[in-house]
């Protein structure tokens, strides 16, 4: 028998799990600012990593369906291929700007060879939609396995971003 669970109760469960058990990372005290002088997220807000993260299930093809937009122009849609090597504990994300390698240490906080970590703040139970970003707010994405995510999962993604201090007015859907 299938239960009809409202988005609010599902979101509440994810947020409680992220806060109660999630890995909390520190925020940079001097987060970068955009040309407008407004940061993409409140650097004093905590940022949490999902406890549901599984690098093998996260592997595969994703679409960047929304991203932090610094330019004011609607960003182009980008495909992203993610792979995980369990022998080296490395994840590789291949996008338009080339491959980026991250160390996986058992949590959804992925550490690049250089720069700040990439935090997987949320992924739905089916690993169809995910929210990623950096503590500074310089990078923020909503990913989906399809070019157009389901409306309920996209709404949940924006609520996660809001909860973690992001200015979602600067997060734009890709075309």
Image (tube, rainbow, N blue to C red):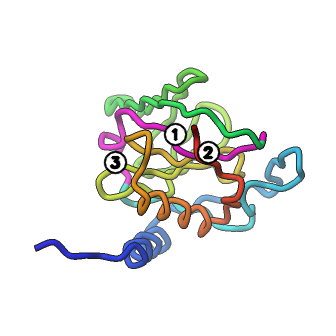
Residue that mark 1 sits on: 64
Q: Are marks 1 and 2 in contact (CB under 8 Å)?
A: yes
Q: CA distance from mark 3 to mark 1?
A: 19 Å
Q: Secondary structure at mark 2?
A: strand
Could you say where residue 2 lies in the image, as x and y percent from the top left?
Answer: 16, 72
Please tell me in which quadrant of the rendered image residue 24 appears. bottom right
Residue that mark 2 sits on: 67
Q: Residue reaching furthest top?
A: 98
Could you say where residue 49 lies in the image, as x and y percent from the top left?
Answer: 50, 58
Residue that mark 3 sits on: 54
Q: Secondary structure at mark 3?
A: loop
Q: Are marks 2 and 3 in contact (CB under 8 Å)?
A: no
* Magenta-tinted stretch: 53-71
Q: CA distance from mark 2 to mark 3?
A: 22 Å
Quadrant in which the N terminus appears: bottom left
Mark 3 Cα within 10 Å, few/some/many (few <14, many 20+)? some
The magenta stretch spans residue 133: no
In the image, what residue occupies the spot 58% across and 40% down?
174
Mark 2 Cα within 10 Å, few/some/many (few <14, many 20+)? many
Please tell me in which quadrant of the rendered image residue 83 appears. top left
The magenta stretch spans residue 68: yes
Could you say where residue 18 lies in the image, as x and y percent from the top left?
Answer: 46, 68
Q: Please state which of residues 36 and 39 is positioned toward the viewer in this rendering.
A: 36
């Amino acid at each position: 028998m299938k239960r009809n669970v409202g988005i609010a109760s599902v979101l509440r469960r994810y947020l409680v799990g992220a806060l109660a058990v999630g890995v909390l990372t520190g925020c940079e005290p001097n987060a970068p600012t955009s040309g407008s002088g407004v940061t993409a997220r409140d650097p004093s807000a905590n940022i949490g990593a999902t406890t549901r993260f599984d690098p093998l299930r996260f592997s595969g093809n994703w679409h960047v369906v929304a991203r932090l937009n610094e330019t004011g122009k609607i960003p182009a849609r980008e495909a992203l291929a993610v792979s995980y090597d369990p022998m080296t504990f490395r994840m590789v994300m291949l996008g338009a700007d080339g491959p980026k390698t991250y160390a996986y240490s058992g949590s959804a906080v992925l550490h690049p060879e250089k720069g700040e970590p990439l935090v997987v703040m949320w992924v739905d139970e089916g690993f169809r939609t995910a929210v990623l970003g950096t503590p500074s707010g310089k990078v923020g994405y909503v990913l989906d396995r399809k070019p157009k995510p389901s409306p309920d999962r996209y709404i949940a993604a924006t609520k996660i971003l809001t909860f973690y201090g992001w200015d979602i007015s600067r997060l734009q859907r890709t075309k």
